[in-house]
Image (cartoon, rainbow, N blue to C red):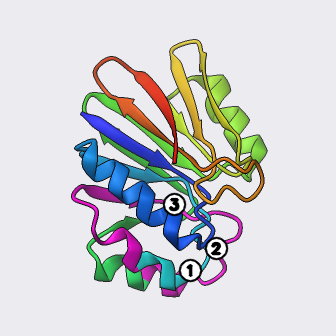
Amino acid sequence: MIVGIMADTHDRLPLVDKAVKVFNEQNVELVLHAGDYIAPFVIPHFEPLKSKFVGVFGNNDGERNGLTKRFREIGAEIHGNFAEITAGELKVALLHGSEEELLRSLIDVESHDIIIYGHTHEAKTYRKGRTLVINPGEVCGYLTEKSTLALLNSQTKEVKIIEL
């Protein structure tokens, strides 16, 4: 299974559209979003996805009721600050990462096969024991001037960071 991973879209509509296009072209079966959508008006831009969508909230997602309502309207799955997902055979933890102590604890105890987070806007992938840790960077490109997302092969655990 190919899993699309994104974070920190921050209402950057043209780049959200590009990310959705890449995910559809890559035949992604599941998209995981690590938060910071910002406003409910961005949600319809995820509707063209041909895959399942699961997301969590980030620290800048203030209008959570509106975001939740819009996600439900397009058939997407939105959680609070944390979600535990199964992707193929993998146990995945999805969170924004702004709660640094929680993120460090999850990584240190190696309780998941994959931990996905955002918040720092920096693309990074590394292993801690049996756990693969993935930050796809920022779709918005505001802080790093690079708009990135990640593709994960759930069988091989290979990750590709893609610049939009």
Q: Answer whether residue 148 is visible to the viewer in this image.
A: yes
Q: Which amino acid does label 3 sit on?
A: Val
Q: Residue sitting at 58 percent across and 63 percent down? A: 9
Residue 33 is situated, as x and y percent measured from the top left of the image, at 48, 55
Q: How crowded is mark 3: few (under 14 residues within 10 Å), some or many (20 or more)?
A: many
Residues at badges 2 and 1 in contact (C-beta under 8 Å)?
yes
What is the C-alpha distance between the residues marked 2 and 1? 6 Å
Residue span colored magenta: 44-68
Check the image and report above or below for 50 versus 40.
above
Q: Which amino acid does label 1 sit on?
A: Arg
- Who comes first in sequence, dot 1 or dot 3? 3
Q: Residues within 10 Å of mark 2 (few under 14, many from 20)?
A: some
Q: Residue sitting at 38 percent across and 44 percent down? A: 4
Check the image and report above or below for 117 versus 91.
below
Q: What residue type is labelled 2?
A: Asp
Confirm whether the magenta stretch covers residue 31: no
Q: Answer whether residue 113 is visible to the viewer in this image.
A: no
Q: Residues within 10 Å of mark 1 (few under 14, many from 20)?
A: some
Residue 26 is situated, as x and y percent measured from the top left of the image, at 28, 41
Of the numbered discs in the image, which one, if any, rests on residue 36?
A: none
What is the C-alpha distance between the residues marked 2 and 3? 10 Å
- Who comes first in sequence, dot 2 or dot 3? 3
In this figure, which residue is indicated by the disc labeled 3?
56
Q: Residue sitting at 70 percent across and 52 percent down? A: 119
In this figure, which residue is indicated by the disc labeled 1?
64
Confirm whether the magenta stretch covers residue 59: yes
Between residue 101 and residue 74, name the one nearer to us: 74
